[in-house]
Amino acid sequence: MRNVAKRLSETTGTEAVPAPRSRRILNMDRQEIKAKLQEIIAIVDEELAGKGEVKEAMQIREGLRLDSLQTVELLFEIEEQLGVKIEDEEVQKLKTVADLLDVIEQKLDAVE
C-alpha cells in the first residue's frame, strides 16, 4: 500500500496531521472535516483529484467509484489523518459520504 500520508503532504504542501488527538482536529467543524475527507479521497483515488467537490449524498462505493481495497485504504487514512477508528460494524452501515461524516463527527465529539 502506498504511503498516502506522505503523498498528501507533498500534494497539499502541509504536513500530515499527527493522530490521534490534535487540538486542531478536535475543533474541526463539519465543513473542515469534509474538506479533509475530500483531500484524503483524492489521494486514495487519483482519478477523483481535481474533479470537483465530493457531495454528501454520494454513495461511497458507487458514487466515489472506490473498490474494496480503496475503501479500506480510505478508512486507514481517516484513522491516520483524523485519529478516528471506524469499527467493522460501523463500516457495514456506511452508504453515503454523509454517513461517513456523521461517524467521524460523532467520534471527534466523543473525545472532547
Image (cartoon, helix red, strand yellow):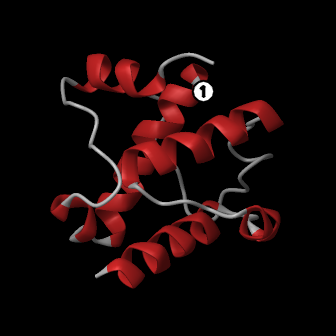
Residue at the image point whose x is 72% and y is 70% from the top: 90
Badge 1 amino acid: Asp
Where residue 41 appears, as percent x and y from the top left, is 53, 38
Instruction: Give left or right: position of 28 versus 44.
Output: left
Residue behind mark 1: 45
Where residue 91 appears, as percent x and y from the top left, is 74, 62
In this view, 94 is above or below 75: below
Q: How many marks?
A: 1
- What is the quadrant of the N terminus in the image? top right
In this view, 17 is above or below 16: below
Where residue 29 appears, as percent x and y from the top left, is 28, 71
Residue at the image point whose x is 59% and y is 64% from the top: 100
Residue at the image point whose x is 79% and y is 69% from the top: 89
In the image, 26 versus 59, the foreground residue is 26
Which element carries disc 1, helix, strand or loop?
loop
- What is the quadrant of the C terminus in the image? bottom left
Q: Residues within 10 Å of mark 1 (few under 14, many from 20)?
A: some
* Quarter residue 76 falls in: top right
Where residue 57 appears, as percent x and y from the top left, is 63, 65
Instruction: Give left or right: position of 9 versus 97.
Output: left
